[in-house]
Image: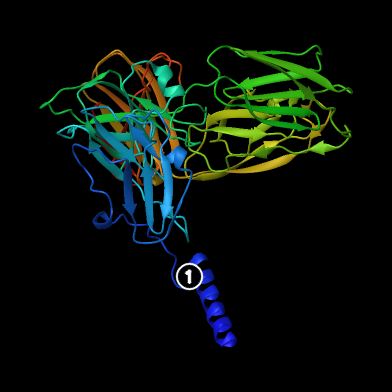
């Protein structure tokens, strides 16, 4: 008898342990399906005259509740925090006993990313429970699309925020009154809204706190307050996302023997001032890059000042270089078009050059100018007229280039090839009925790679632009409306309520070799 009791006790203990230890089943294909909400066993959605103190969600599988205080939101917000309890495959959400729900109000309870399966963490998205304490549920809505302001690509899984208040500071400090997540096409629909005035934003919420507080978060905003009026449809809204112009800073720092290179986090708006107490430190700045060379025998420093940014950086001593040794320059563009500039690059800055000893071995390859780059002292630019369909050599005599460490170059012969003219295509863009005057930057792209660029102040509504020497293939045209005439695209400015500069994309006809293609462009 005792043995039977022990046996039964052991059986029930094992059964209890098995039930308590819920685990994913190993083997088989990956589980890609999130928990499914089962309305039949749950609280009735879209109730009116709601008086319950508890809302039940039943799911078709075991689940885990992930950070509910962050992910689960109710609008209008409650005075006291919601209470959560897992009961088998059900989630119970209770109101605090002190909570008094507002009369004649539609509430929207959103579970966000709180519900995940226990095996792969698949999220049950866009789960929404709606109820009203009055006799009807509000039915107004706002729809639209969120896109990237520069690329025009739809932004999926993006937070769209709706506030009753109009101050932008609310977007930076408080969770929204209503919110929704965009679908795979960047579309959103805010439903069950009451009449009133609202402000609308979108956010790539990197830290999942439901408001804008990080420089790495892209944002979008609607220009005007939205007025929701009963029986009046709201036109779809397009929100354009971009990063904000955050404080100037150094993004990358590279301190090497003899030089320090910096990359800023953006192109400065104001002038960049570079200082050093030593004449042996040479400083160069181009767009978002800065490089400092130290030609002395002691460590040095240099200082940067631009906008509200100021900092000091070291420049190491160059390791010993034998001035009696020679060096070679490299040709960076071996294949060129007839109007290209040959780019010769040295490892170290160049201090002296005898231009007359740089030549070609072909009388039809005519050098016109040779000069050091103002933006990078390691680069020699050789411009001229190059013969199509020919290979020729650029000849460098010995000891004609001296770097700042006293080394001289070795004699060298650099091969250059200029393909025949019939291997290229030409493109004529017919700018038609453009509102002028307007500053435009036109960029030709193939596989999202920039191939050619032209910036212009357009004074007449109809203008033709020709791009020559283009490889055959498929191209797109990107047109940037440079509103502030600074030569670069600028994203939105939330603080000053300025939208991003407009960007337009056009698919172009296929470009074929030895062919001129025409395309009409209307903005």
Number of numbered tags placed on the structure image: 1
Please state if 170 lies on the left or on the right of 133 as rendered.
right
The one of 370 and 276 positioned closer to us in this rendering: 276
Q: Position of residue 91 (x, y in %)?
A: 38, 51
Residue at left offset 15%, top offset 34%: 136
Q: Residues within 10 Å of mark 1 (few under 14, many from 20)?
A: few
Asked if one can make out residue 491 in the rendered structure from this viewpoint, the answer is no
Of the 4 image quadrants, the one containing the C terminus is: top left
Q: Position of residue 159 (x, y in %)?
A: 38, 35
Tell me if residue 166 comes above or below residue 257 in the rendering. Answer: above
Q: Residue furthest front?
A: 1
Residue at left offset 87%, top offset 34%: 321
Asked if one can make out residue 453 in the rendered structure from this viewpoint, the answer is yes
Q: Quadrant of residue 376?
A: top right
Look at the numbered disc 1 and give the secondary structure of its residue.
loop
Q: Position of residue 11 (x, y in %)?
A: 53, 79
Q: Residue furthest left?
A: 231
The one of 330 and 384 positioned closer to us in this rendering: 330
Q: Position of residue 165 (x, y in %)?
A: 33, 18
Q: Which residue is mark 1?
A: 25
Q: Quadrant of residue 51?
A: top left
Tell me if residue 119 comes above or below residue 313 in the rendering. Answer: below
Residue at left offset 40%, top offset 40%: 72
Of the 4 image quadrants, the one containing the N terminus is: bottom right
The one of 181 and 70 positioned closer to us in this rendering: 70
Please state if 351 lies on the left or on the right of 62 as rendered.
right
Colour mode? rainbow
């Amino acid at each position: 008898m005792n043995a039977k009791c022990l046996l039964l006790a052991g059986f029930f203990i094992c059964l209890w342990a098995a039930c308590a230890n819920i685990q994913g089943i190993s083997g088989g294909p990956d589980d890609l399906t999130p928990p499914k909400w089962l309305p039949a066993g749950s609280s009735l959605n879209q109730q009116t005259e709601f008086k319950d103190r508890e809302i039940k969600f039943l799911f078709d599988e075991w689940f885990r509740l992930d950070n509910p205080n962050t992910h689960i939101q109710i609008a209008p917000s409650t005075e006291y925090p919601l209470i959560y309890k897992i009961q088998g495959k059900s989630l119970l959400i209770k109101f605090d006993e002190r909570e008094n729900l507002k009369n004649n109000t539609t509430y929207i309870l959103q579970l966000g990313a709180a519900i995940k399966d226990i095996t792969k963490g698949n999220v049950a998205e866009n789960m929404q429970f709606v109820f009203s304490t009055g006799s009807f549920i509000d039915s107004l809505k706002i729809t639209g699309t969120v896109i990237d302001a520069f690329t025009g690509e739809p932004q999926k899984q993006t937070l769209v925020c709706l506030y009753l208040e109009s101050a932008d500071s609310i977007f930076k400090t408080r969770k929204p009154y209503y919110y929704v997540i965009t679908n795979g096409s960047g579309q959103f629909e805010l439903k069950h809204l009451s009449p009133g005035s609202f402000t609308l934003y979108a956010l790539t919420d990197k830290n999942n706190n439901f408001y804008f507080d990080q420089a790495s978060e892209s944002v979008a905003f609607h220009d005007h307050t939205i007025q929701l009026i009963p029986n009046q449809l709201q036109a779809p809204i397009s929100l354009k996302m971009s990063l904000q112009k955050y404080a100037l800073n150094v993004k990358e720092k590279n301190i090497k023997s003899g030089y320090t290179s910096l990359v800023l986090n953006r192109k400065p708006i104001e002038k960049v001032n570079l200082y050093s107490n030593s004449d042996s430190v040479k400083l160069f700045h181009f767009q978002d890059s800065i490089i400092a060379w130290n030609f002395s025998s002691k460590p040095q420093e240099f200082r940067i000042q631009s906008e509200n940014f100021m900092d000091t950086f070291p420049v190491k001593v160059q390791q010993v270089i034998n001035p009696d040794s020679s060096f070679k320059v490299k040709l960076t563009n071996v294949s060129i078009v007839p109007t290209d500039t040959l780019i010769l690059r040295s490892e170290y800055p160049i201090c002296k050059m005898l231009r007359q000893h740089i030549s070609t071995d072909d009388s039809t390859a005519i050098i016109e100018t040779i000069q050091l780059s103002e933006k990078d002292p390691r680069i020699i630019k050789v411009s001229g007229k190059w013969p199509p369909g020919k290979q020729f050599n650029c000849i460098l005599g010995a000891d004609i280039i001296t770097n700042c460490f006293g080394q001289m170059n070795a004699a060298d012969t650099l091969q250059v090839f200029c393909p025949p003219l019939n291997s290229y295509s030409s493109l004529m863009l017919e700018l038609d009925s453009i509102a002028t005057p307007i500053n435009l930057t036109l960029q030709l792209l193939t596989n999202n790679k920039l191939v050619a660029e032209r910036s212009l102040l357009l004074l007449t509504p109809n203008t033709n632009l020709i791009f020559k020497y283009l490889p055959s293939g498929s191209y797109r045209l990107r047109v940037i409306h440079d509103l502030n005439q600074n030569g670069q695209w600028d994203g939105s400015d939330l603080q000053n309520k300025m939208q991003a500069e407009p960007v337009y994309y056009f698919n172009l006809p296929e470009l074929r070799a030895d062919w001129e293609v025409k395309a009409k462009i209307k903005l």
